[in-house]
Amino acid sequence: MAPKRKPDRVDACIIGAGASGAAAAKVLTEAGVQVVVLERGPWRTRETFGGDELANVNRYNLWPDPLLNPRTVRSSADEEPRVELFCPVPQMVGGGTVHWQGWLPRFTENDFRPRTVIGDLPGATLADWPIGYTDLEPYYDKVEWAFGVSGAAGANAFESPRSRGYPCPPMPMSRYAQKFHAGCAALGYNSFPTPQAALSQPYNGRPPTVISAFAQQHGDPTGTRSSALNVFVPDAVATGRCDLRPDSYVREITVDERGRARSAVYADGDGDLIEQEADVFILACGAVETARLMLLSRSARFPNGLANGNDLVGRNVTWHEYSAAVGLFNDSIYAWAGGGYVSASSFQFYEHDDNRGFASGGHVACAGVGIPLPINWGLPDRPLWGAEAKRMDREYFNHSMAVAMVVHDMPQHDNRVDLDEKVTDAWGLPAARITVQPHPNDIAMGRWLIDRNAEILEAAGAHKVYRVYIDRITGNCSHQHGTTRMGNDPETSVVDRSCRAHEVDNLFVVDGAPFPTATGANPTLTIMANAWRVADHIAKGRPG
Amino acid sequence: MFFDPHQRATVEAAMARIIPTDDAPGAREAGTIDFLDRYLSGLDHVYAKPDGSGFEKLEGKRADAWRQRLDIIRDKYAHGIADLDRRSRDRFGSDFATLEPAQQDTVLSELDRPTTLPEAETVAGFAPVETPLQQASVEIDLDFFPLLALHTRQGFYADPIYGGNRDRVGWDVIGFPGPTSLAEVHSGRYTALPYFAEQEVGHGAQAEA
């Protein structure tokens, strides 16, 4: 058989078709740029999704299978790494947005200047961002209106100025959201409907989102949720300028004699190696896989990995450990309805406050417990088996809810992603090795927020409340940031304010990797807004 | 099917202690043993087709991974069942399946202690309260008894297409108004809106399609 023909060189090659890659593809192709998108996973359609808790949550139907895609974890460089499914994200067209519930709060003005607001925090590498809220505000607006985000402008008393409201009113009120609002009101806290990537009413020719129980961690068989798969990918494909190639696993970015990125070498679905050349390369693999690809791309010019002359690629990684207070109520609150995440939020504890004894804060919101469907629902003190376990299932399944938070974990130089020395994936490439140790601030913040969440549940009338504190970072949230931190100084950052690599002027990163800090809010809206901003910049700066 | 008759009787008896039958159905009535035996039988029942019309045919690397996983799990069962019988004979002079329920509980209680994993991780394998955004199952890392408890739970609460949760008894026991079939969700007919705040519904009432 003849070898496969080398594909034509294109204007731009995007690696990864998740939230950020699909956003960049839409923006670039709509601006007239010819784009190839290389996605390592399949291109699944809504016909392949369904309401199957066992397959989707427990059997890796959407999650990466750890036997094929292992990662290793250790808490310090002295420790032997263990294989663990750390911070997984679906690897397919649409990425994490395929199975998300899509909570889309914006960051606030202070999120972009944490070093200024907080000051020096020993052990942490806090840095101000080289961009500010006003740089992103127009792009928040673009993403919200492309998606048809359902929310209520002004309801969050702590939000930063917005140029206009949300395109759709909030989603219907769940019973668990109602409890959360009641608890906050009793304590004098501001609360608001969580802005969501779902349609509360018809929008842009799309029907309203179906309110199912199979949403969080499930693909969307109705195609009615807002996601990269349902919105950005069709927009990009409609231009006729987007060549999206699924099952195309990039193993290396090669460089030319001047040290510019020359090609992406990938294995296609048959396992054949293909080389794709382009003027510009845009990494959008998620912060872990982007760092891994850069570290895999070694050359004479970059012996320690692409654009890694300062040994910062993979460092300062942050994870957003998730935890919650869990409350039991006498009345039925059905916290699985809507997938358990048609929710209410508060930014009451979001901004930094010196009086709390720790730095920064976080977004808190209500949710179902666990996934929260029957197999994966649970309570902290439910026994493994027997009559008591059954009793708790029967009595509390419809009567429990969580008030949850993600820890705004502090960036640290030694928390990093690099390449494992022994473990390889099913394609023979070294696994990503995670080295992570929580900062004392992470533990303190988690404890304080969980206590506040417990008080909200008590104020809402819960007859029993559990406080589930964190004591380590397990990567349970699928949020990942920081591995190619953005900054003005090439000595202390990997990419500049345009998310262009300091050392490689035709290489850009548009996922969460450029975020210098994690912030206390769900990152994907900001990831997509930033990808849109960077793609805009690339399209405008293109010669000719 | 994977189990021989003795293994099957042993596992079924253990499952009946994990989710016992009382005034409401338990693992026995839900057919959790059928769920598990079918799962262990091979690659033909890993993923139901999302419209409920059958099961996916696994190929390539995905099939390789599942073959590997099922081999590990089958091995845990073969050794775990033998261990249950050994403990039962040592303590009560008879195989596990023939013991009285209280004696079976005694034997299982001995196993209800994690040996290879920190306790927190073992608990997270089937009661992932603190990890709602995480892939919950760590199947192949679990010891035999936590694995059996997880599979019993899955067989009680998974969609009936997988062979357990017979007549939706698991869902009825806890008042979860699940869909009548996978097709109902796949087509978009299934809605949980009646369980939102605006409308009053009775406990455990069925959602109207």
Image (cartoon, coloured by chain):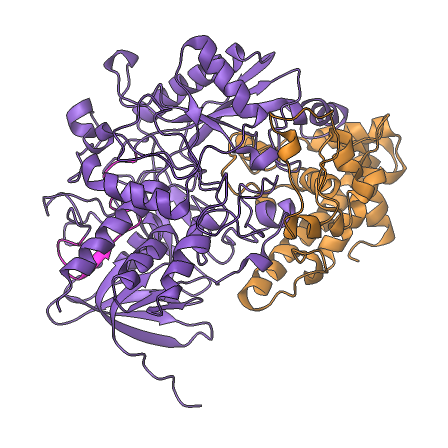
- Residue lying at 84% horizontally and 26% vertically, measured from the top left: B102
Q: Position of residue B134 (x, y in %)?
A: 50, 40
Q: Position of residue A96 (x, y in %)?
A: 44, 48
Q: Colour of chain A?
A: purple
Q: Is residue A45 left or right of residue A36?
A: right
Residue B206 or residue A20, whichever sits in front: B206
Tell me, yes or no, if residue A89 can be seen here: no
From the viewer's perspective, is residue A9 above or below residue B7? below
- Residue lying at 28% horizontally and 50% vertically, measured from the top left: A531
Report the magenta stretch's main SS: loop
Q: Is residue B21 left or right of residue A523?
A: right
Q: Quadrant of the C terminus of chain B?
A: top right
Q: Position of residue A19 (x, y in %)?
A: 38, 51
- Residue lying at 46% horizontally and 58% vertically, measured from the top left: A92
| Chain appearing in orange on the rendered image | B
Question: Quadrant of the rendered structure where residue A375 is?
Answer: top right
- Residue lying at 72% horizontally and 48% vertically, measured from the top left: B77
Question: Quadrant of the rendered structure where residue A9 is?
Answer: bottom left
> What residue span does the magenta drawing correspond to?
A500-518
Tell me, yes or no, if residue A287 can be seen here: yes
